[in-house]
Amino acid sequence: MSGGTLDVVRAGALTTVQDLGRSGHAGLGVPRAGALDRPAHLLANRLVGNPADAATLETTLTGVAVRTDRPAVAAVTGAPAPVRVNGRPAAWGSAVHLPAGAVLDVGAPTSGLRSYVAVDGGIAVAPVLGSRSTDLLSGLGPATLRDGGTLPLGEPTGEPLYADTLLWEAPPEELVLPVLLGPRDDWFTAAAVSTLATGRYEISQHSNRIALRLEGPPLERAVHREMPSEGMVVGAVQVPPDGRPVVFLADCPTTGGYPVIGVVPESLLYPAAQAAPGLTVRFVPRRHRR
């Protein structure tokens, strides 16, 4: 039995389908993908009664507008944004009832970068390698949303969550990223590690779901020979030849040929999903305990 459909009225600057990602395929060269702001994705699903791995919509910069062909329950989380149902204001961060044919319009964030839209039943596109996530690097998964497109919905299986109070951390005004030094911090001078700790960086407009690209003081290398490609992980802080660090996100490649000075623990990386271009970034490096 069909769970209905979701028509795309306004796709926005970049809206993708995301779930928890396709882990376990790095050996095939397949990135993990998945929601950049995982806590926001999980909360949106919880509010509408979906399981944690149901697919949601991840919007960027300008939101999205969709129309459901059946009565539905939706929730918008992540970056705070104006929410309207058929032109009337509706709640952000709460379960919202949509009559059949209603248009849910999520506007541009008032702060942060990415909002998450869950609909009861989840976005039921066909999974690829066990995930419904769009991967911008490899091209796996569903295409980015386009005006006039249609997405299938699953059958609702749970009950919406209604809460009088929702505690949610606001998007950062400054992004502070703890970094575990290594595995290639010895390829950099002591001054470079000091620069990483004291320098102020700014998120470049060229950042995306693959990586945060940063503008700021370069990190000086002590070793200048070429390095064979090595495995990459989400949160790796790679330093290309210009010396300016790049922080890898969910759609990052599985290998890379530039040294990684440190790694941001994934559980501490989620605020990066809401870091808009121009935001200041500070690193707090520390060494592994032995």
Image (spheres, helix red, strand yellow):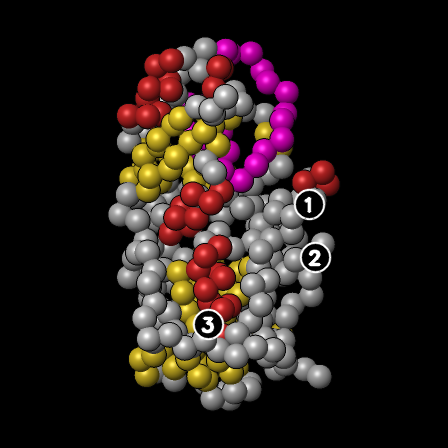
In the image, residue 164 above or below residue 234: below
Q: Residues within 10 Å of mark 3 (few under 14, many from 20)?
A: many
Which residue sits at x=65%, y=51%?
A: 22
- Observer-nearest of 107 and 81: 81
In the image, residue 10 above or below residue 279: below
Alpha carbon distance from label 2 to label 1: 10 Å
Whether pointer 2 and pointer 1 mark residues with C-beta atoms closer than 8 Å, the reply is yes
Which residue sits at x=45%, y=54%?
A: 37
First along the sequence among labels 2 and 3: 3
**x and y, in percent, of residue 91 in the image:** 34, 76
Q: Residues within 10 Å of mark 2 (few under 14, many from 20)?
A: few
**x and y, in percent, of residue 95 in the image:** 42, 77
- Observer-nearest of 265 and 63: 265
Which residue sits at x=68%, y=45%?
A: 24
Q: Name the residue carrying label 3.
A: 47
Q: Considering the numbered disc 3 on the image, is that residue within a helix, a strand or a loop?
A: helix
Quadrant of the drawing holding the N terminus:
bottom right
In the image, residue 273 above or below residue 262: below
Q: Name the residue carrying label 2.
A: 130
Alpha carbon distance from label 1 to label 3: 28 Å
- Observer-nearest of 248 and 264: 264
Q: Mark 2 or mark 3, which is nearer to you?
A: 3
Q: Considering the numbered disc 2 on the image, is that residue within a helix, a strand or a loop?
A: loop
Q: Which residues are magenta?
A: 223-246
The amino acid type found where label 1 is placed reads Gly
First along the sequence among labels 2 and 1: 1
Q: Is residue 226 magenta?
A: yes
Whether pointer 2 and pointer 3 mark residues with C-beta atoms closer than 8 Å, the reply is no
The dot on residue 24 is 1
Q: Considering the numbered disc 1 on the image, is that residue within a helix, a strand or a loop?
A: loop
**x and y, in percent, of residue 15 in the image:** 49, 61
